């Protein structure tokens, strides 16, 4: 009964954290309001259970146990509220609340916390523990006294300025403070929440860095020694890959093309220090201690394994940066070692539950960490699903059965999280994991051995790393071949939170109940219907046009059932960070039509075509290299109406992007509303605006969609819109006021988020209609 009560206690604590996390992050409740309300509800449920359940379940836990479980739920909720990240009174983000002229710069002093990393845009990324700041005037001269500040700052500087930087240094950085942006498109990456999860509430766009003081010794020196030795033996790219497969990619920066390839192939877990790496390391240590030459000299093997294994695991956790997933695996490894020392059998599920509970007692906000959730669910899947899978694979040799069962179980149990957070499925990842597991094992173990040797003799460590060239080359070739296959990654669309929870509920029903085990085919059918049913229905019935929030780029995605039209791709950054993620969350794997405006280029379209093949691509502007780079692109001449499925598009000029569009004007199904006409105007100077007024095509449109630049009053009068949508970072007050004075409803994508139009609901801005989510700034 004591063991049962302990498991129930751990479960009650974790459940309490999970419930308060849902309420705070998805229910729009403030941190302490959600924590207090959740705690009181759980305590009340515990009291109710104490009154009722002992009478109905005489052999179950006693009343005081149920009451204690409610109390643990209360403790979990209060602990979450206590440690939930929030800026202090002196946090540097408070400086943003002070009135200052636009473009005002700050001078910030602080201590560098981590090694600089290079961003995709080529800038250096720094994490700074700030100490002091002061404002600068327009000439760059200090204004006023130094102000004491606290907290952390996310800093970007020119990459060249990071050459001599390392953790512990005291830095003086000049730049402009800014508030991190929140997600402005449906289910997009929330930069503000990402920084808040690390206790950062402001960013600094730095221009100059001055080293004020050198830092002391740190583990970063050991990591750099390993990384440099392995890069010397294998070259920069393969060396970084081997270092990441030994220490995790938080300890070393892997080139982005390699990261993207491994993620797309479903091998991202090999680049993150995880339970796989911990089990390899622990197995290596225990294998060494079992050598015949050592067994006779160790009087108490179990105690020796516990002491040495714990020390090795602790060192590995520190070397990898104390990530939650690694700490979870290390705690479970220590639990196994304790069982061996006491000569008692360890219960894997109980060990997992205890490890997770201990970590969440230490830092309850780790329950919101995506990597931690994936690690826990993959481990749970291995414990629960591998044994029955092995039973069904008894016709295979044991080694092959294990190689198939392990990746299949981990893949299956992480699907709901993958659909919820990443909106994709890697179709061949199970097969690739089967083939790549021996290579990953050799590379990871070899990287660990090479790393240890590099700490003592770097030249010898580099030589050992060079021996890994062949398996590393083969692994990279397999990954690149796999992602080149058609359909290697499928965009499934974003599932709702209730779907993810329901899927895991069905997993539990099929794994832990007698009815579920007898009717697993029925549970499997329910899983498919729950996961894919709403996504299929939405794709089959959706009629929607979305103007994306993409800075100054005018980009729109028009969805009509399974047919999709994309207008513009924006800059390379927009295509990668905005358009691609939107297509994935919408479950779009193919574009029926696409129109490239003046702000698009061939490289952007090549990037998007690799993700979602385009059946028909048109371009409207004069760009000689465009049709050469994309031979399938067709020039859309001015005043040549074109029917694209249910839509009608006409280019109004050959000098800039000016399109007249009638959306959802034709189709096989009856339309309940009148089609809506749109006009898109970008890069139009006053001369082009005047010439557009002479167009033979009527300009009157329901919606004016433009780049936010001032338009001639007579042009606005000719269009006579009901709605105006500015794809712009900033809309001048005079322009907006003039439109509003004409009775036009005005949206600005950078301010209001993506603008979604549906025939029955009209126009809605994402930031105005998105479900409220609590942030650490509240």
Image: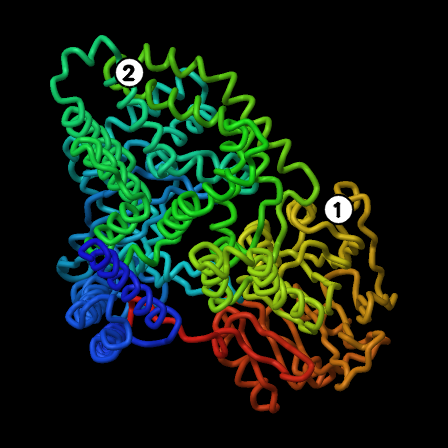
Q: Quadrant of residue 716?
A: bottom right
Q: Quadrant of residue 298?
A: top left
Instruction: Return the disc, 1 or 2, that comes first in the chain's sequence.
Output: 2
Structural distance between the alpha carbons of marks 1 and 2: 52 Å
Circle number at residue 606: none
Instruction: Identify the residue at image location x=14%, y=12%.
Output: 297
The answer to which of 174 and 375 lies nearer the viewer is 375
Residue with the mark numbered 2: 453
Instruction: Identify the residue at image location x=47%, y=67%.
Output: 497
Circle number at residue 626: 1
Above or below: residue 446 compared with residue 21: above
Q: Is residue 578 visible?
A: no
Q: Is residue 652 visible?
A: yes
Above or below: residue 169 compared with residue 519: above
**Disc 1, SS:** helix
Give x and y (percent) for residue 138. 31, 59
**Disc 2, SS:** helix
Extreme residue in the front direction? 58
Q: Quadrant of the C terminus?
A: bottom left
Asked if disc 1 and disc 2 are in contact, CB closer than 8 Å, the reply is: no
Give x and y (percent) for residue 606. 68, 45
Above or below: residue 677 compared with residue 367: below
Nearest to the eye among marks 1 and 2: give it. Answer: 2
Q: Is residue 506 left or right of residue 275?
A: right
Q: Residues within 10 Å of mark 2 (few under 14, many from 20)?
A: many
Give x and y (percent) for residue 583. 62, 58
Instruction: Identify the residue at image location x=25%, y=38%.
Output: 345
Q: Quadrant of the N terminus?
A: bottom left
Above or below: residue 460 compared with residue 42: above
Give x and y (percent) for residue 175. 31, 53
């Amino acid at each position: 009964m004591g063991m049962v009560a302990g498991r129930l206690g751990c479960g009650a604590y974790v459940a309490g954290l999970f419930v308060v996390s849902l309420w705070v992050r998805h229910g729009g409740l403030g941190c302490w309001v959600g924590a207090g309300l959740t705690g009181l509800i759980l305590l009340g449920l515990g009291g109710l259970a104490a009154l009722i359940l002992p009478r109905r379940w005489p052999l179950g836990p006693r009343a005081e146990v149920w009451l204690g479980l409610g109390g643990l739920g209360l403790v979990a909720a209060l602990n979450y509220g206590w440690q939930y990240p929030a800026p202090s009174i002196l946090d540097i983000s408070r400086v943003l609340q002070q009135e200052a002229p636009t473009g005002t710069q700050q001078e910030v002093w602080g201590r560098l916390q981590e090694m600089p990393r290079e961003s995709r845009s080529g800038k250096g990324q720094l994490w700074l523990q700030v100490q002091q700041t002061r404002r600068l005037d327009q000439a760059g001269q200090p204004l006023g006294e130094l102000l004491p500040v606290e907290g952390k700052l996310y800093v970007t500087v020119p990459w060249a300025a990071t050459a001599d930087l390392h953790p512990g240094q005291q830095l003086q950085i000049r730049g402009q403070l800014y508030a991190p942006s929140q997600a402005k498109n449906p289910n997009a990456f929330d930069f503000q929440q990402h920084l808040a999860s690390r206790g950062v509430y402001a960013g600094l766009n730095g221009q100059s860095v001055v080293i004020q003081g050198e830092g002391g010794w740190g583990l970063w020196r050991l990591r750099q020694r390993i990384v440099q030795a392995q890069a010397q033996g294998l070259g920069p790219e393969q060396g970084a890959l081997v270092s990441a497969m030994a220490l995790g990619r938080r300890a070393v920066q892997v080139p982005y093309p390699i990261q993207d390839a491994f993620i797309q192939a479903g091998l991202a877990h090999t680049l993150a220090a995880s339970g796989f790496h911990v089990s390899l390391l622990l197995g290596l240590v225990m294998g060494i201690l079992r050598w015949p030459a050592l067994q006779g000299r160790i009087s108490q093997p179990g105690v020796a394994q516990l002491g040495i294994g714990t020390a090795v695991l602790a060192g590995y956790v520190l070397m990898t940066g104390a990530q939650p997933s690694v700490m979870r695996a290390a705690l479970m490894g220590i639990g196994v070692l304790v069982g061996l020392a006491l000569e008692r059998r360890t219960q894997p599920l109980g060990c997992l539950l205890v490890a997770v509970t201990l970590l969440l007692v230490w830092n309850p906000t780790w329950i919101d960490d995506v990597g931690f959730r994936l690690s826990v669910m993959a481990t749970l899947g291995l414990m629960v699903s591998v044994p029955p899978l092995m039973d069904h694979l008894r016709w295979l040799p044991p080694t092959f059965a294990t190689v198939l069962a392990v990746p299949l179980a981990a893949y299956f149990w992480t699907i709901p999280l993958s659909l919820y957070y990443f909106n994709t499925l890697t179709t061949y990842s199970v097969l690739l994991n089967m083939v790549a597991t021996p290579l990953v094992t050799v590379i990871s173990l070899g990287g660990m051995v090479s790393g240890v040797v590099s700490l003592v003799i770097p030249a010898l460590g580099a030589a050992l790393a060079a021996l890994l060239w062949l398996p590393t080359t083969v692994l990279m070739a397999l990954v690149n071949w796999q992602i080149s296959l058609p359909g290697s990654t499928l965009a499934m669309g974003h599932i709702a939170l209730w779907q993810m929870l329901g899927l895991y509920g069905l997993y539990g029903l099929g794994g832990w109940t007698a009815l579920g085990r007898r009717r697993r085919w029925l549970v499997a059918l329910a899983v498919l219907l729950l996961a894919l049913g709403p996504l299929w229905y939405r794709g089959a019935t959706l009629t929607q046009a979305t103007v994306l929030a993409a800075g100054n780029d005018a980009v729109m995605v028009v969805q009509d059932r399974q047919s999709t039209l994309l207008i513009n791709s924006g800059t390379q950054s927009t295509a990668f960070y905005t358009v691609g993620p939107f297509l994935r969350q919408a479950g779009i794997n193919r574009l029926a039509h696409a129109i490239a405006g003046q702000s698009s280029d061939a490289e952007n379209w090549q990037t998007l075509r690799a993700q979602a093949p385009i059946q028909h691509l048109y371009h409207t502007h004069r760009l000689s290299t465009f049709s050469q780079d994309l031979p399938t692109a067709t020039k859309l001449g001015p005043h040549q109406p074109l029917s694209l499925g249910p839509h009608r598009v006409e280019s109004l000029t050959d000098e800039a992007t000016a399109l007249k569009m009638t959306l959802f004007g034709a189709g096989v199904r009856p339309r309940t509303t009148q089609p809506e006409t749109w006009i898109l105007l970008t890069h139009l100077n006053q001369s082009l605006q005047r010439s557009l007024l002479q167009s033979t095509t009527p300009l009157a449109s329901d919606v004016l969609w433009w780049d936010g630049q001032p338009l001639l009053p007579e042009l606005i009068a000719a269009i006579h819109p009901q709605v105006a949508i500015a794809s712009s970072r900033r809309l001048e007050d005079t322009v907006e006021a003039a439109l509003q004075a004409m009775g036009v409803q005005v949206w600005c994508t950078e301010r209001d988020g993506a603008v979604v139009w549906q025939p029955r609901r009209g126009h809605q801005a994402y930031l105005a209609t998105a479900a409220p989510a609590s942030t650490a700034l509240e």
